[in-house]
Structures are given as C-alpha cells and as structure tokens.
Image (tube, helix red, strand yellow):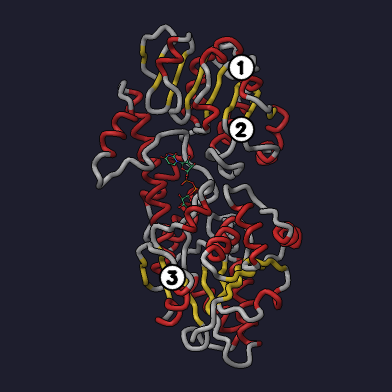
Amino acid sequence: MARAPLVTVVGSSFVGLTTALALAHHGTRCRLLDTDAAKVEAIQGGRAPFEEPGVQAALKRHLKSGRVTATASIPDAYRGATHVMICVGTPPAWDGSQDLRFIKAVARSVGEEIHGRMRGGYLTAIVKSTVIPGTTAGLVRGEIESASGRRAGRDFGLAANPEFLREGTALHDALHPDRVVVGGIDKRSADEALRLFRWSKAPVVRTDPTTAEAVKYAANAFLATKVSFANEFANYCAEVGVDWYTVADAIGHDDRIGRKFLNAGVGFGGSCFPKDLKAITTAARAAGRPLEIAQAALEVNGRQPSEVTRVILRELGGLERKRIALLGLAFKPGTDDVRESRALLIAAEVIEGGAEVVGFDPLVKDQFARALALQHRANFTRVETIEEAVEGADAVVVQTEADAFRSLDPRTVKRRARHALVLDGRRVLDPQRFARAGVDYWGVGVGMVRAAGGRKRA
Ligand code: UDX
C-alpha cells in the first residue's frame, strides 16, 4: 500500500500556506519550508503572515491537529516527504520576463534531497508557482536531475499543478477548486500528484507539465482581457450616452459570454494579472508568436486610471493645490494588498499635477504610502474614516467596491467636500441619488450625471 502522503510545501506565503491548509483540511500532513525565519516563527506561533479570511483560524486548527508544521531547516523539511510542492514567488525581472531564481534554488535543493535518499523514498516534485510554459519540463527537471544524478519519470516524479486562488477567497478557492489541473512528466508523476486531490469533486485535467502551465496563463490572460474589453467598451459607451452596465447585464445573459468579469472600472491590479500578462507576453514575443490581444489588454489597463484624472482636470480646471479624496487604496476590496493597485497610479498622476491626496481604505495601513514613489509621499495622507477623507476635498474618487464605499452618503459629500464632485471608479454608487443630493457624479461607463439632474456627456 502506498505511504500516506507527507507534503513539504516550499514557500509559506499566500499560495503555499493556503494550499497546505486546504490539504491539511482533507487529512494530509504538510510541512511548510521557508527561508524567512521570522515567517516560520510567526506560523509556528499561529499567526498567518498575510490577511486572508479564514486562514488564521485554519492555521491554529491545523497546528493543533499536527497536520501543519513549519520549519526553516531544509533537511528537516524534506525528511520522509513523499511530495514537495513548490510555491515560491516568480517575480518579474527588469525586462518583464520571469525571475526564476527561487524556483531554480528549490529545484536544486529537491535534487540534493533525492541524491541523499539511498533507496526507496520516491519523491514527487510538484510546481505550483506560476511559471512560463516549459519551465517544469526544462529548468526544474534539469536542476533536479543534475543535482540528484537521477532521472525524472524513472527515479522521481515531476508535475505542474497551477493554482487559481483569488485574494480574499483563497482558502475557499483551495477547498473548492473548480478544476484540478495536473501535468505529469509521466503517468506515475500525475498519479502521485492527483493522490493529494482525491477528496476533490472538481473535474480533473490530466496533461503534460507545459500544457498545465499554459492553462494558468490562458486563464489569467483571458480574464484580464475580459476586464480590459469591458473598460474600453465602457469608455466608448459613456461617450455616446450609453450605460455600459446595462449592456454588460444584457450580454451577460448569453452564456457564451457570461456576466462575470465585465465590471468596468479603473482597471485591474493585484499580484497576478499584471505580472502574469507581462511575463507571458514577453515569453510569447521571445518565442516569435506575440500575444497581441493580451498585450493590448495590458495597454488599455495602463491607461484606464487616467480616465479619472482626465475628468478631474476638466471639472476642476487644473490640479494645482487641489485636494483629492481617494477611497480604496488596495487593488480590490477585502484585502490590504496594494500591489499594482490602480490607486497608486491615480495618486501619482494627480500628485504630479500638483494636487494632494487624502486616502482611506478599511484594511490598508502604511503599505500604500511605502508603495508610492519617494517624491510623491509628502503629498499623500492616510486617514482613518471616509468623513476625514472627504473633508475639504475638491473631488472624491471611489477606487474599490468596498461595502463602506457602496454606502457613501451623498449628503456627507455635499456637506464636507469643497467641491461636490464624486468619481465612481467602480460603479458602486447610484448616480441619480448623488445628482438629486446636489453632487456632480461621474462614473466609468456612465459618464457625467450633473447635480442639477440633467445628464451630459463625459
Ligand atoms: C486573480 C484570478 O482571479 C485568480 O484565479 C488567479 O489565481 C490570481 O489572479 P486576484 O488577483 O485575487 O485573482 O483578483 P480578482 O478578483 O480576479 O481581480 C483581479 C483584478 O481585476 C482586480 O483589480 C479587480 O478589481 C479587477 N476586476 C475584476 C475588474 O476590474 N472587473 C471585473 O469585472 C473583475
């Protein structure tokens, strides 16, 4: 009978820890390995190194059950493991390609572990990190084979198993995947990887590692393209007096299209879409088959935050000494993650024009100011309430669809702001309600709805 799996999860950040907790939930023992001793110590003490609903409680539960442990020691981490799941970061390099330094180092250490195993102890390495198609069968295989002196598919297993976790719902997504994609270098590798997901009722896609890697990029590129398509079309709709959201609802009824990811706004951000699109478009160009649609999706996304600046400029006649309230600093609601947040671009643009920005987000603390360019920080202030942000503002910009912003009271804007002007970057406010209360409203895909009640074009 096969040994019960013991999984070493390398990398204890968002993907690694969440995956370990999901496997542990289904009875699999997981050992987290991280070179960051402070992170390991936090995890051992029951503190998750990031904000994510349910993760903290699940961590406490599985530390107690003994199914999850954490270590910074490589030999301790690999001892007796049946699987190694590679969940380390693949940050962008200076030229937009992927920096595979961490993947390479882990592959080497897995190879050394395999080399040290005298007999038996078959180990399957599973790449969960998002890597350019060909990385598992190329670099990872090469590193493990050269460090171990053994052959993939004969002496050890190797598979790619991409994740599709969204921030804010990561644990739920890991526990209820809508598909399990496993690309094995051979049959045994795929069987071994799939052994970890026997509990899942989701459709299984069994394929080779390079195809599995491509699935992840195709998914993210398609979703990001859908958002950029919505944004570009929404800009056009606003121009000709059409409400994009009505159009989106209508086309969304066509199940070939679907309503999801058609919400127009100030663009997509986060740790995945922008980075993954840059990486795959760079790789595709290098392969001589450019992904022009994905490239265009990125370009549209880069321009979309400027819609806000354009309207502020037009409405206020300039940005010099203006005070802009920025509601929503994270890249989306329910997270404190500011990576690639459109709020950073909006803030930088209006500050460059001479304005000051007062920002509020229910979850974000000082990380936003730290992510701003040095020369912009003096013109940014973070406050603790919506009211403080709106106080004396010349324009109020809503950048995420956090619940707190959905319930923004037009009377608060009317009473506290210097100019009663709201820019709805996520279409979460009722334009008519604001117009009735005497506030000029502008929304992505809607255009301008004037305080007087009359509707003019943006
Ligand atoms: C995404 C993918 O959904 C996930 O499968 C992958 O593993 C990682 O990348 P995440 O970055 O957490 O997850 O966020 P998601 O909820 O997908 O949103 C991405 C961005 O698109 C956000 O900035 C969001 O505001 C934006 N978006 C999303 C829109 O502007 N409109 C939409 O209709 C949907």
Where is mark 1, residue-wise? 393
Mark seen at residue 43? none
The nearer-to-camera label among 1 and 3 is: 3
Q: Of the two numbered discs 3 and 2 on the same chain, state the one appearing first in sequence.
A: 3
- Vertical side of 438 occupied by 66: above or below: below
Left or right, 222 with reference to 53: left
| Mark toward the viewer: 1 or 2 | 2
Kindly indicate the quadrant of the structure image that contains residue 12: bottom right
Residue 361 is tagged as: 2
* Comparing labels 3 and 2, the label whose residue is closer to the camera: 3
Q: Amino acid at mark 1?
A: Ala
Secondary element under disc 2, as helix, strand or loop, is loop
Q: Which residue is mark 3?
A: 198
Q: Are marks 1 and 2 in contact (CB under 8 Å)?
A: no
SS of the residue under disc 3: loop
- The residue most toward the front is 65
Q: Are marks 3 and 2 in contact (CB under 8 Å)?
A: no
Residue 247 lies left or right of residue 414; in this view the side is: left
Nearest to N terminus: mark 1 or mark 3: 3
Q: Residue at x 56, y 65 (%)?
A: 24
**Whole-percent x, y for residue 134 in the image:** 45, 70
| Residue drawn at 57 percent across, 68 percent down | 86
Residue 20 shows up from this direction: yes
Using a 10 Å C-alpha cutoff, classify the residue at mark 1 as few (fewer than 14 neighbours), some (14 to 19) or many (20 or more).
Answer: many
Residue 215 vs residue 44, the one in the foreground = 44
Tell me residue 28's x, y (percent).
55, 70
Note whether 77 is above or below 274 in the view shown: below
| Residue 288, visible in the rendered structure | no
User: Crowding at label 2, few (<14), some or many (≥20) Cα neighbours within 10 Å?
Assistant: many
